[in-house]
Amino acid sequence: MIDTWAQYVFLFCGVAFILALKGLSGPKTARNGNLVGAAAAVIACALPFFYVSNMKHVPLIIVAIVIGTIGGVIGAKRVQMTQMPQMVALFNGVGGGAAALVALLELHQIGDGANISWFNLAATAFTIVVGSVSFAGSVVTFAKLQELMTSRPVVFPGLPIAFGGSFIAVIVLSVVLVHSPGMLVGIVLALLGLAIGLLLVLPVGGADVPIVISLLNAFTGLTVAAGGYVLANTVLLVAGTLVGASGTFLTLLMAGAMGRSVANILFGALKGGSTLGAGEASDRPVKSVGPEDAAIMLAYAEKVIIVPGYGLAVAQAQHTLRELVDVLVARGTEVDYAIHPVAGRMPGHMNVLLAEAQVPYEQLIEMDEINDDFKSTDVVLVVGANDVVNPAARTTPSAPIYGMPILNADAAKQVIFMKRSMRPGFAGIENELLFEPTTSLLFGDAKDTLGKLLTAVKAL
Amino acid sequence: MSGIDPSVMWLTFFILSVFVGIEVISKVSSTLHTPLMSGANAIHGIILLGAIIVTGETDNALATTVGLIAIVLAAVNMVGGFVVTDRMLQMFVRKPKKADPTEGASK
């Protein structure tokens, strides 16, 4: 039994987590929300040192906390904004892994063949399995985003059978665990969870990885909630459930923004035939222009829309782009940024990247609000984006991005498409927009070319 | 109070939390999706609390080692998550009036 005063503090922390999430969903309150959450987490974690009467290994526990804290802070401070999705995936994965380990330890604590409620054991099995799924899945997600492995769907012939087999084995072994709790069964469940995590994420294509991060985040939340039930700890249950529920909701919201169902994202590649495009450069004829001509097109346009993509951030060209926009605005041109919900490598990522370059957020217009403006736009400048303006999403049912709402860049009078090469985008599909007669290609490194554009516009 | 079955009480906590979790973020703009996801990610790092409790209860050397590993992992999740979220949100809150082109260019 936890001391009553400590239970009150846990209640306080649970409420603080609700306020933290609430704060995080509004632009003005977000930073405070995050700090409230952090404070509550620190207080909750410090509590056992005070109410547990004879806690063992206190010095070792403190050393472990310090090591983890240093690791977390270094990672969080060093990571570039472009690598944010990998970082979230990694943090999520270690959290899931920790939850699975906690459940295994609790199982060990219970002892083999002990008499304990079946629901408690079922929750233990759930924590072990889903925590392991989240860990392995996040590691694969990390590897895909960090380009340690191919970002294209990885499918092999026996995959559906292996996945289904692991799934059935998990259910059977969970029942076994409930009937006769034992460490061996727990460890096998963890291994099966790892296998399911791998098999779940391997077939997911690069463009869909953001949704998977969100889904795995929700999984870890639910894992922590189940862990809270097992340990009879209210704050774990409440915090985990909050994250699990909001994460699931967010996942569905994002999948909706991409015009996809979650099932289709996870299992689409298994049906086969969804991998259009060889991922190689095409040799079809295109129209290309130099920076000087592109500068004239931009400088004498009345209305310009910028479509920024991940490539912009990789080239670290956000700052140069903002300077170019400033010069154009000073000349009297109307300039907006069109932000696709999944521009970048995770939903909302582009907003973070442009905020880093201090682009005023009034200039960032969301897709639904700006899509009708493209037809009255003189020039669309596509910088480092590709899949979010690919008409294949509307016209080619076999394309992996088919059904995803896209920015109507093809409706504009002229399109300047900045590209480093003719290689296709992250989803690995050829972009028909490149071959349109209204499209001019401006080849080169984004930062370098934007610099030339800037000089040329200034000279006019 | 004796009339409440503990498992129903836990179920009540769970179901109410589900609704609260959905309700509090239902109006989030897509601008904030990345920080929200990262912040929620940090909140489930609270499993650190569970890891501390379990490790503090065990005598077995192997179990202690596993527990300490869990603590390190959970602390990375929790601390790293909150710090990185704060770093992102700092950029949103800052009023971008006078821009310094050199700042952040090296990041």
Image (cartoon, coloured by chain):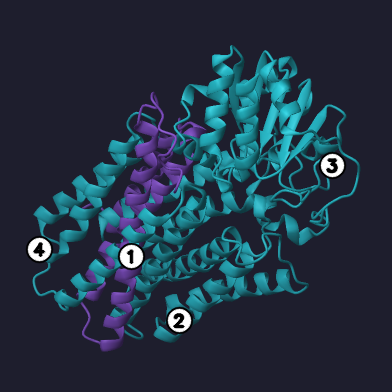
Chain colours: A cyan, B purple
Q: Residues within 10 Å of mark 1 (few under 14, many from 20)?
A: some
Residue B62, image x, y percentages? 31, 87
Chain-order first, disc 1 or disc 2: 1
| Percent coordinates x, y for residue A95 in the rendering | 39, 63
Query: Is residue A299 visible to the viewer in this orientation of the structure?
Result: yes
Chain of the residue that carries numbered disc 4 in the rendered image: A
Mark 4 and mark 2 in contact (Cβ < 8 Å)?
no
Contact, mark 1 vs mark 2 (Cβ under 8 Å) = no
Q: For marks 1 and 3, give the CA distance.
A: 45 Å
In this rendering, the answer to whether A71 lies above or below B91 is below
Between the residue at mark 3 and the residue at mark 2, the CA separation in whole angstroms equals: 46 Å
Above or below residue A289? Residue B88 is: below
Camera-side mark, 3 or 4: 3
Q: Position of residue A23 (x, y in %)?
A: 33, 35
- Determine whether the residue tagged by mark 3 lies in a helix, strand or loop: loop
* Residue at the disc numbered 3: A396
Q: Secondary structure at mark 2?
A: helix
Q: Identify residue type, mark 4.
A: Phe
Q: Chain of mark 2?
A: A
Task: Please identify the quadrant where the C terminus of chain A is shown.
Answer: top right
As drawn, the label of residue A187 is: 2
Q: Chain of mark 1?
A: A
